Image (cartoon, rainbow, N blue to C red):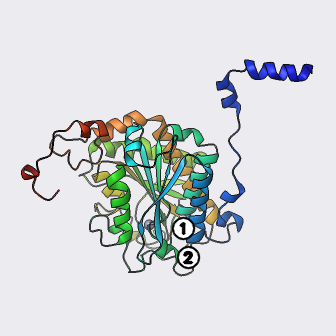
């Protein structure tokens, strides 16, 4: 009796905030273990299992929503998963929240498998693990696999989609249904403030992880310097603090220890790839690359960990610097360009006068 009375008093007198702080993160449901985890990292998670994972996440987590944004060339469904607290289903809800919107694009190259594996673990941590508080600070958009056809082809996937296109070079031409789904289903309606294009690298590589900002000079100075400066540093620190190695992304045409005269190259400037396309559209955009063996099944567990660590570092930086990011992205708004400006806040759209298409041309 005395004990239960003391317990009752304790419950009544303990400030609610303190209880919330001391509560451990929710246990991660067994059904949200990935196929790769359950195979002890000996098998890649196949497309059907990726779908099962996100359906289950959406069923269990009140913060998660899932919608279909298109189909691959072979008819596999392409999905958008949103994570936020409170949950968002529509773009206007995300814009009206006043929080930065982070879009993570995975597996545009089908044979770069650790991105989609790391993204599942990151999404699970947001919904049930140590990263839950981030969902109060930002809206997370995920396309789990942009190129699932390439992901399923061969023993460990192919770079191109099944029509032979490099989908990552298609963000301007939009020849492929996969690129159209990302632009029309995510970038146009949701207008993310930060974009992460996650990849993997093959060939001779010294470092575990690499990142790069948009290098095209049409990218606004404000967002380019945020991407090249603090956003990149957050990723570098997350990788190094966990004991792994980091270097800025670059191209190596050959093994520089045996053919040094070929040297190393910076990455391209073309706006057709998401790293630069996202920047040209006004978003703080980063490329991730993790080191990969020629066989994409080798070292799947550490590669997945690098991707998850880097995503976490970027998301924590966004959560801690939301207003600065929003201000930088919104500073790109120009008076004449507002009709196509991807980051115009909703309340300004509402206050605009009626549009005269005669003045701006008949084809919007
Ligand atoms: Zn790639």
Helix, strand or loop at mark 2:
loop
Structural distance between the alpha carbons of marks 2 and 1: 8 Å
In primary-sequence order, the first of circles 2 and 1 is 1
Circle 2 packing at 10 Å, graded few (<14), some (14-19), many (20+), is: some
Query: Is 131 on the left-hand or right-hand side of 180?
Result: right
Residue 290, x across and y down, in percent: 52, 61
Examine the rendering and report whether any part of residue 132 can be seen: yes
Label drawn at residue 156: 2
- Residue at image x 57%, y 75%? 295
- Residue at image x 41%, y 43%? 93
Pick whichever, 275 or 94, lies toward us: 94
Query: Is 41 on the left-hand or right-hand side of 336?
Result: right
Residue 125, x across and y down, in percent: 61, 48
Q: Which residue is mark 1?
A: 113
Q: Are marks 2 and 1 in contact (CB under 8 Å)?
A: yes
Examine the rendering and report whether any part of residue 193 can be seen: no
Q: Tell me the quadrant of the picture where the N terminus can be found.
A: top right
Label drawn at residue 37: none
């Amino acid at each position: 009796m005395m004990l239960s009375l003391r317990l009752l008093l304790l419950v009544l007198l303990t400030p609610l905030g303190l209880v919330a702080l001391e509560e451990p993160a929710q246990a991660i449901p067994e059904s949200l273990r990935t196929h790769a985890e359950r195979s002890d990292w000996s098998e890649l998670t196949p497309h059907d299992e990726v779908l099962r994972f996100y359906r289950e996440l959406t069923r269990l987590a009140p913060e998660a929503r899932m919608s279909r944004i298109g189909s691959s060339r072979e008819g596999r469904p392409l999905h958008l998963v949103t994570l936020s607290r409170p949950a968002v289903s529509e773009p206007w809800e995300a814009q009206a929240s006043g929080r930065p919107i982070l879009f993570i694009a995975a597996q545009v190259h089908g044979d770069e498998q650790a991105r989609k594996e790391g993204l599942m673990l990151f999404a699970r941590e947001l919904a049930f693990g140590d990263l839950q508080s981030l969902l109060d600070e930002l809206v997370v958009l995920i396309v789990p696999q942009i190129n699932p056809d390439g992901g399923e082809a061969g023993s460990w996937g192919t770079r191109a989609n099944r029509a032979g296109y490099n989908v990552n070079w298609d963000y301007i031409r939009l020849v492929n249904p996969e690129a159209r789904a990302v632009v029309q289903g995510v970038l146009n309606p949701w207008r993310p403030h930060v974009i992460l294009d996650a990849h993997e690298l093959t060939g001779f590589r010294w470092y575990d992880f690499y990142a790069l900002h948009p290098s095209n000079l049409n990218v606004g100075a404000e967002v380019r310097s945020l991407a090249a400066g603090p956003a990149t540093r957050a990723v570098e620190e997350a990788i190094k603090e966990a004991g792994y190695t980091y270097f800025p992304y670059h191209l190596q045409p050959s093994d520089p220890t045996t053919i040094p005269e070929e040297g190393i190259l910076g990455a391209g400037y073309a706006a057709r790839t998401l790293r630069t396309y996202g920047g040209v559209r006004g978003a703080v955009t980063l490329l991730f690359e993790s080191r990969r063996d020629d066989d994409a099944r080798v070292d799947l567990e550490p590669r997945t960990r690098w991707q998850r660590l880097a995503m976490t570092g970027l998301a924590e930086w966004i959560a801690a610097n939301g207003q600065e990011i929003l201000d930088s992205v919104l500073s790109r708004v120009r008076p004449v360009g507002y009709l196509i400006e991807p980051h115009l806040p909703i309340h300004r759209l509402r206050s605009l006068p009626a549009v005269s298409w005669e003045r701006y041309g008949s084809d919007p």
